[in-house]
Amino acid sequence: MSMPPDDRAGLSRRDLLKSAALAGAALGASGVFSPAVAESATAGAHPDLAPVSPAGAKSMKGVPFEKRDVVRIAIVGTGLRGRSVLHEFLGCPGVKITALCDNVPDKAKQAAKMVTDAGQPAPALFTDGDHAFEQLVQRDDIDFIHTATPWEWHVPVMLAAMKAGKHVSSECPFGSTLKQLWELVDASEKTRRHCLQLENCNYGYNEMLVNRMVHAGVFGEPLHGAAAYLHDLRGILFEDRDEGLWRRRWHTTNNANLYPTHGLGPVSWYLDIHKGDTFEYMVSMSTEERGLSIHREETVKDKMSAKWSERYVTGDLNSSLIKTAKGRTILLQHDVSNPRPYSRLNAIQGTKGLFEDYPARIYVEGQAGGERWGAIDAWKPKFEDPLWTKLGEQARNGGHGGMDFVMAWRLVQCLREGLAPDIDVYDSAAWSAPLPLSEISVAKGSAPVKFPDFTRGNWKA
Ligand SMILES: NC(=O)c1ccc[n+]([C@@H]2O[C@H](COP(=O)([O-])OP(=O)(O)OC[C@H]3O[C@@H](n4cnc5c(N)ncnc54)[C@H](O)[C@@H]3O)[C@@H](O)[C@H]2O)c1
């Protein structure tokens, strides 16, 4: 598989170079961090933090989709995730799958069979090479395109889709460099097409329940959230198929939090990011790399394997702290290289209590039993999200405990009823920004790095 034209490693390195002045300012001559210096120096020192807004650009915040009875959807990348999302879309009323694309024809055919098995006409297939999506986006029978390709293709597919007049979404990460994230924001504003990350974890049962509890004031004033992607992917990363064919390569190029959004998306909703608050800056540090090297030693017995020519640079556990404009803090972690049970942390602490997930538990000041964790069950009748009350039974038969179906159903509802999407281009860009920002901070001795304001001041509304 060739790399897309603007290859991510090259851009990342450019980001790093541009960040030199920024981080140099943050770490004073003595090597000691001076917040005041960092604050004033960062915005101008890194061109990708605040590029000039293209003339005439208008915000996409709150812009509704056009109303339509039937949503015509195309999917680019019909591997494991593409087919899983396809399954969810096929379960939604008012969806027609019109086109599919994968550079491996067999993957596209497997997906096409799912469509015809569901009683829909055979979709058009685009399988001729890495750039076949450029033909797909030109069709006039597509309203919305979802891309579930390897990460390096998300941005080229989304830019091509918007240019051809289609609304579009991707999996995580939305983009992997600040430059790419700005390109997506600017293209969305220019083309007036929505461009978003379909973040399934925002639609998890616990996440939606807790979001309602936070906004009802159960935990008091929110102070701190915790978000993570802690998932032992060693086996998957070393397979000779699916993600094993491309995902491990990122561990040879970026020492960063490679996958920030599953945890950060829901916590951003708890904290009203871009609805009165915004990420201001972050600091990040990584452990040494160990997990993948040890796994290779233990499992890749053939020393002639190409896997032995790889050098892993992603520190196993990356920990970042984000400060928001309102003074709230977020712990953000990433580790896919060590043995451990799955966790996205998913926690929120307020002035009256807190919620922590994995396992889900709650403490609200004054609750029966004293300072001990309580179960969340008692809160469900009052705070269960109406989407889960309506869709729960059907959703639980789908992917990731049901969140994938709720996500797909809700997107389709927005598209059919002419509502603004729940997640917009600004949210999506900000949730993925910790990938390049953590890389910059780690490379500069955990220097604080300012977040770009992708909303260009519109986050206060
Ligand atoms: N949201 C979630 O819970 C979740 C879960 C798993 C994966 N993902 C994300 O989904 C994406 C895909 O992951 P996956 O597990 O399905 O991987 P995968 O390798 O199974 O699928 C990727 C597919 O994209 C195809 N492809 C590669 N280059 C292409 C191109 N230029 N044009 C068209 N198709 C191309 C591959 O042939 C493959 O079929 C990734 O971004 C991953 O992070 C998200």
Image: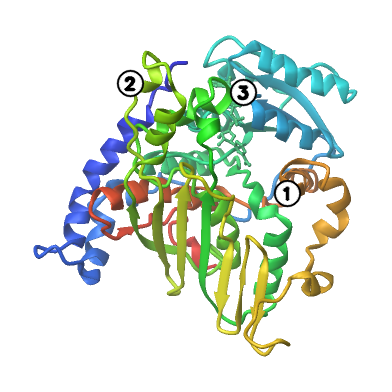
In the visual, does 15 lie left or right of 116?
Answer: left
Q: Secondary structure at mark 2?
A: helix
**Disc 3 marks which residue?**
137
In the visual, does 47 lie left or right of 121?
Answer: left
Cα gap from disc 1 to disc 3, whole angstroms: 28 Å
Cα gap from disc 1 to disc 2, whole angstroms: 39 Å
Q: Are marks 1 and 2 in contact (CB under 8 Å)?
A: no
Q: Residues within 10 Å of mark 3 (few under 14, many from 20)?
A: many
Q: Earlier in the sequence, mark 1 or mark 2?
A: 2
Which residue is at a point 43% across and 57% down the rendered structure image? 456
Residue extending furthest toward the left: 29
Seen from the viewer's position, the closer of residues 172 and 243 is 243
Which residue is at a point 52% across and 67% down the rendered structure image? 225
Q: Nearer the viewer, mark 3 or mark 2?
A: 2
In the visual, does 441 lie left or right of 100?
Answer: left
Write down the quadrant of residue 381 in the picture.
Answer: bottom right
Can you tell which mark lies on residue 403?
1
Mark 2 residue's CB less than 8 Å from ligand 1:
no
Q: In the image, ligand 1 is in what quadrant?
A: top right
Seen from the viewer's position, the closer of residues 332 and 236 is 236
> Does 268 appear above or below 183?
below
Residue 120 appears in view:
no
The percent position of residue 162, horizontal first and vertical second, equals: 57, 33
Q: Secondary structure at mark 1?
A: helix
Seen from the viewer's position, the closer of residues 423 and 151 is 151
**Disc 2 marks which residue?**
309
Q: Earlier in the sequence, mark 3 or mark 2?
A: 3
Which residue type does callout 3 highlight? Val
Q: How many marks?
A: 3
Which residue is at a point 67% across and 50% down the rendered structure image? 421
Which residue type does callout 1 highlight? Met
